[in-house]
Image: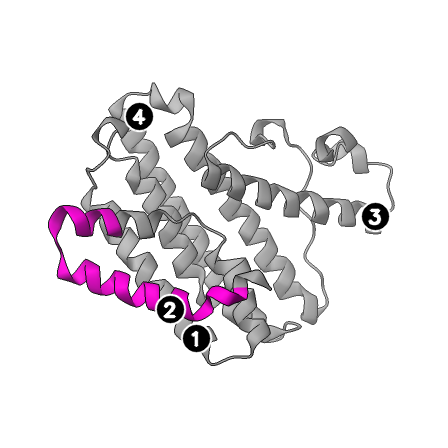
Amino acid sequence: MCQTVGLHRSSTTKGDPSTLAETKRHVFWLLYTIDKNISLNLGFTSHFQDHDIDTDLFTPSDHHQYRSWDLMTLVTAEFATIQGRVYDELYSISASRASDEKRLNAIEKLSVDLIAVRDKLLAIDVSAGLYADSLHGMAACADFITYSVLTVIYRAETRPRNAMAISSRCYEAATLALHSHLKCFTYFRGRQTHKQIEYVHWILLYPSFAPFVIVFTHAITTASNADLSLLQETVKSLDLIKGLSLR
């Protein structure tokens, strides 16, 4: 529907009043972000292909209460672009036919770009924003989401035919993701219920479960006590918030 309306094309907003044009851009980039995330998590091509998009990014608000929200939304769209590239360059059909050298080069570039976007998000001053506590919570969980996607990137270092093989960087990213989750859980655990629900719906369920699977697989293949301990702590944290996903 979004493509039928043409929100991904600059010509659609050319004759619109500036306020309406900005609203359309806000809507498009929000849907774009969701689309790229779902694409990577579920493993299919995104509906919005970057080569077919020419609409502009929206302009951040000049109002101090809304500006940090807009800046964070724009950086999140950048993050989504990388998620789309991860699927296209590492997991699509065409990517499966690429040479090892091309795949490894893509892994290096994607991992560097991902960390750069994470750092860009953390550099945003959210203190003056409306509902600044929610913005602080999102920033506090940036590592969890970043390391979760980084796990997926490094998972491509090994070919599907060797499903149990896990590279050292993939394993490291996965463990960092789970440790980051536990840190986020501690941050949100002492807050009101609606803040905990925000964490479950908008942070915990946002990336794939790749880190959990990788650490579990590594624990089985190596009989690692450290892995088992980390998984046990993770399960305990999930057990404490399992009812929140139903609200």
Residue 232, horizontal then vertical, whole percent: 27, 64
Could you tell me how far apart the alpha carbons at marks 2 and 1 are, in whole angstroms?
A: 12 Å
Which amino acid lies under the numbered mark 1 shown in the image of this protein? Tyr
Instruction: Check disc 3 and report the residue beneath it.
Output: 20
Instruction: Check disc 2 and report the residue beneath it.
Output: 237
Q: Nearer the viewer, residue 141 or 60?
A: 141
Q: Quadrant of the N terminus?
A: top right
Graded by Cα atoms within 10 Å as few (under 14), some (14 to 19) or many (20 or more), the crowding at tag 3 reads: few
Q: Which residues are magenta?
A: 216-244
Could you tell me how far apart the alpha carbons at marks 4 and 1 are, in whole angstroms?
A: 40 Å
Write the residue at 75% across / 32% down.
6
Of the numbered discs in the image, which one, if any, rests on residue 86?
none
Which amino acid lies under the numbered mark 3 shown in the image of this protein? Leu
Classify mark 3: helix, strand or loop. Answer: helix
Which amino acid lies under the numbered mark 4 shown in the image of this protein? Lys
Instruction: Check disc 1 and report the residue beneath it.
Output: 187
